[in-house]
């Protein structure tokens, strides 16, 4: 039995008599996950599958935006006309985004830009109508002759 104990207590010795531990095993770095391909932020925002046929291109309301902006230039009466002018320019910007978003297959973005362009164009048009009404009321109250006199004075100088 003593021989058996001696055999189990003996460990193989490496060169130099030191017990060395084997080198650590190299593990490969964890696989990097690719960035997400969609911009959806919640489980309720699911992409819409349009199949082979895309939806109809939404109306961009460019004509209405330009008309409203031009009317605000002519109906400018203080801050009201300036606000209408700014809103009209923003409507023109949104209306130009409709075609580019639709062509890049961002159908939801094109629809959103079309809705914003239409809403802002209508607001700008409403502001222009209010400005024109203010001009008409001012002409009625102050009389057309006094306004024409002022216009003639400006033209003479």
Image (cartoon, helix red, strand yellow):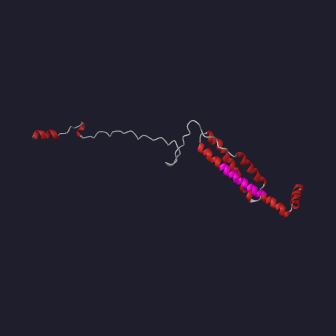
Q: Where does residue 156 sit, x and y in percent of width and height?
A: 90, 55
Which corner quadrant holds the C terminus?
bottom right
Q: Where does residue 71 sit, x and y in percent of width and height?
A: 76, 52
From what the image shows, is residue 126 above or below residue 9? Answer: below
Which corner quadrant holds the N terminus?
top left
Q: Where does residue 84 sit, x and y in percent of width and height?
A: 72, 55
Residue at x 60%, y 45% (from the top left corner) = 109
Q: Quadrant of residue 10?
A: top left
Residue at x 42%, y 40% (from the top left corner) = 31
> Is residue 68 rendered to the left or right of residue 32?
right
Tell me, yes or no, whether the highlighted magenta stretch contains residue 131.
yes
> Is residue 44 rendered to the left or right of residue 13?
right
Q: Where does residue 101 sit, x and y in percent of width and height?
A: 62, 42
Q: Quadrant of residue 22?
A: top left
* Near-viewer residue (82 or 123): 123
> Is residue 134 rendered to the left or right of residue 16?
right
* Near-viewer residue (17 or 56): 56
* Near-viewer residue (151 or 135): 135
> Is residue 98 rendered to the left or right of residue 44?
right
Q: Which residues are magenta?
A: 116-132
User: Would you say the magenta stretch is mainly helix, strand or loop?
Assistant: helix
Q: Count the marks: how many?
A: 0
From what the image shows, is residue 139 above or below residue 50? Answer: below
For this orientation, the residue located farthest to the left is 1
For this orientation, the residue located farthest to the bottom is 141
Residue at x 71%, y 51% (from the top left corner) = 88
Tell me, yes or no, whether the highlighted magenta stretch contains residue 148.
no
């Amino acid at each position: 039995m003593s021989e058996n104990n001696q055999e189990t207590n003996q460990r193989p010795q490496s060169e130099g008599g030191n017990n060395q531990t084997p080198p650590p095993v190299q593990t490969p770095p964890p696989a990097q996950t690719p960035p997400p391909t969609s911009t959806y932020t919640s489980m309720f925002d699911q992409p819409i599958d349009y199949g082979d046929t895309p939806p109809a291109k939404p109306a961009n309301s460019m004509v209405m935006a330009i008309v409203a902006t031009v009317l605000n230039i002519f109906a400018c009466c203080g801050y009201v006309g300036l606000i209408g002018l700014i809103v009209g320019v923003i409507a023109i910007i949104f209306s130009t985004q409709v075609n580019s978003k639709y062509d890049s297959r961002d159908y939801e973005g094109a629809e959103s830009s079309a809705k914003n362009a239409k809403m802002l164009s209508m607001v700008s048009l409403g502001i222009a109508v209010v400005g024109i009404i203010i001009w008409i009321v001012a002409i009625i109250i102050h009389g057309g002759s006094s306004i024409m006199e002022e216009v003639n004075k400006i033209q003479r100088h």
